[in-house]
Amino acid sequence: MRRRSLIAPIALALLVAGLALPAAGVSKGSGSAVPTRIGAGEGELKMVAWAGYLEKSWVAPFEKQSGCKVKPKYANTSDEMVALMRSGGGGQYDMVSASGDASLRLIFGGDIAETNVKLVKPWKDFHAAFKSPTTNTVDGKHYGISLQFGPNILLYNTKKQKKPTSWSAIYDPANKGQISIPDNPIQIADAALYLSKTTPSLKIKDPYELDSKQFAATIALLKKQRPLLGKYWVYASDQIDLFKNGKSTIGASWPYQMSQLKDAKQPVAAVTPKEGVTGWLDTWMLSSEAEHPNCAYLWWNYVSSPKVQAMQATTYGETPVNKKACKEMEKLVKGSCKTYSAAAPQAYYRSIKFWKTPLTDCGDSRGKVCMPYSKWVQAWTQVKG
Amino acid sequence: MAADATSLPEGPPRKGALRASSAVAWRWPGAKAVGQLGLPLAAFLLVYVAALVALLVSSFWSVDEFTSEVVHTWSLDNYRILWDDPTYRRIVLRTVGIATAVTLTCIVIAFPYALFLVRVAGPRLRVLLLVATVIPLWVSYLVRVYSWRLILNPEGALNWALTGLGLPGQNILYTNWAMWLVYSYIWLPFMVLPIYAALERVPGSYLEASADLGAKSLTTLRRVVFPLAIPGIAAGSIFTFSLTLGDYIAPGLVGGPGSQLIGNVVFSNVGIANNVPFAAAFATVPLAIMIVYIAIMRRLGAFENL
């Protein structure tokens, strides 16, 4: 018996050593060579995507013409996407439809391969703003191909609410218990955007670049908002339920919920409040450890083409980045090009504050005093209480 | 014996690795123990202990704020944040509070129910009710939580029944009350079964003896049946308490603002912030709570029933 009592501590010590050792050797190379031509497809493409981004109507023709079988994995949040792309040391998935708040984290984490845009023909037809946006282009190097963009909207029940004009509606005690907002740390930027207009003394220029004083004021506003909320919604379907059963009559939302609720004949409408909106610009990115890069290039060419861009835009309710998609949209749904501002997206694009990863470096003269994303997540826990 | 042995045909002695190892095992009992227990012990160490050690070790690491990759420098920062920030203290207290409330609720419902099963119900009714108790466990957890959303909706089944009876409607969906209700419902079978097992072991003669000595039925219940059921209650409470302590799904589905549990913070730090070290540090809190809890329950005899 005495001898066996020694086994446990020895085993434990070995385990600790075993865990500490690999820490030394792991470093990911992001310097894999950029391809100069597209080879034959590898027969498979494993993708992490937003729900609604890999619909059969446009994935099936791609599979047929390229021979690449698409294996989708749907994620609910940007953060889940980052986690998925890093799972198992990367290489579990080939591509990800990353939004701006995830893309830089992935690029700087070494998880994304550089893209040769010359191999993606429709790219030259993109509106200038989407050829090299800061969300997927670093130091002139491209890390992926822009896909579509859209705004976060203020959704309301037209029977129970007056048409709001300002985000103040979701901070208004008069709406107590009726408000629903996303359960997502990036929501802090929405509050910061509101404060940038209502409290100019804070001098918030970019809602994603908040120094400690601006950040504290924003968090204070969100903490004051909490008792007014009916719910922080986790899934888009949650908010749809909330609006359907009357638990919520106003809230921060996505175009997806509005189209779903309208399809269900619910009395809802959305406005772009006078303070402006936050939004997303999504990019299909290629993992630095991808096993099927040729299929990925074939996918980029396919999904960036005007017709497929139009299909996704009209199905999901967002704006395509390809100039030529407008005409195709009109063919699919009359008036949709104008609805989603696909004809003149640049001015529309400038009016939206796009999701991006908050970094310590403010990106201006203030220097490295801004709150990084990990602080946003911790603050969000405190906001929710 | 000796006579029998001579009548047995004696084959050639077996050779080979098996024979040799069995000889070794016979000569050195220590080697025998290692050979028998080695494999399961190794699996246990690798799967359970290694995971816990990994958890503990990584809780002292941190995350690079730029690339959000884990940095392997040792510090107590994660624990300091946990200690200094009142939010986390509140979340721990809320989690333990709800776990305690759920456990008490389950005891209050499960004890009379199990007693009814053992002492009152006939054999057929007993089987029927036991199956009815266990059936919900065959249904997906998510389905059961979502069904409570339908029940608790302002226009749902519960309000329909309440207003039908002329009572005022409730509006507890997306509150901590809803979480308490849902957990109490979901974990109830885990309390019923151990109490049932404990009560089933109480011999009928004890109750007769108690009655013969002049005890009324309530006195018998209080002084004979209940003390004998305590190990079962303790075992059941470990289930209900630890299951509530570790859950993170129900708060998102039926909880409201201010319904975060420990599990949610752990989940958001792993899944959202990719801050595994901080999540690991926070995950040690329910671990510590459970160690204390199980130590108390052991005193109450919870493990005599397993």
Image (cartoon, coloured by chain):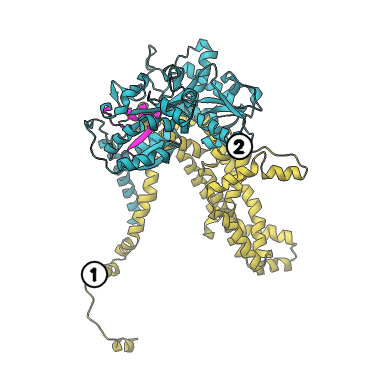
- Quarter of the image where one finds residue B116: bottom right
Protein chain holding label 1: B
Name the tint of chain B in the rendering.
Answer: yellow
Q: Position of residue A13 (x, y in %)?
A: 31, 45
Would you call the spot at circle 2 few (<14 residues within 10 Å), some (14-19), or many (20 or more)?
A: many
Depth check: give the residue in front, A54 or B279: A54
Q: Is residue B301 left or right of residue A345?
A: right
Identify the residue at horizontal 53%, vertical 43% (top origin). Answer: B245
**Residue A99 in magenta stretch:** yes
Tell me the kind of residue under disc 2.
Tyr
Disc 1: which residue: B20
Which tag, 2 or 1, sits closer to the chain's start?
A: 1
Q: CA distance from mark 2 to mark 1?
A: 67 Å
> Does the rendering let one see residue B80?
no
Q: Secondary structure at mark 2?
A: loop
Q: Quadrant of the C terminus of chain A?
A: top right
Q: Secondary structure at mark 1?
A: helix
Question: Image height check: is A43 above or below A138?
Answer: below
Identify the residue at horizontal 52%, vertical 35% (top origin). Answer: A236
**Residue A338 in magenta stretch:** no
Tell me, for residue B174, which label it has, or none: 2
The label nearer to you, 2 versus 1, is: 2
Q: Position of residue B221 (x, y in %)?
A: 69, 59
Question: Image height check: is A259 above or below B16?
Answer: above
Depth check: give the residue in front, A246 or A315: A315
> Does the rendering let one see residue A286?
yes
Tell me the kind of residue under disc 1.
Ala
Identify the residue at horizontal 28%, vertical 40% (top origin). Answer: A292
Magenta region: A91-116
Name the tint of chain A in the rendering.
Answer: cyan
Q: Position of residue B165 (x, y in %)?
A: 77, 45
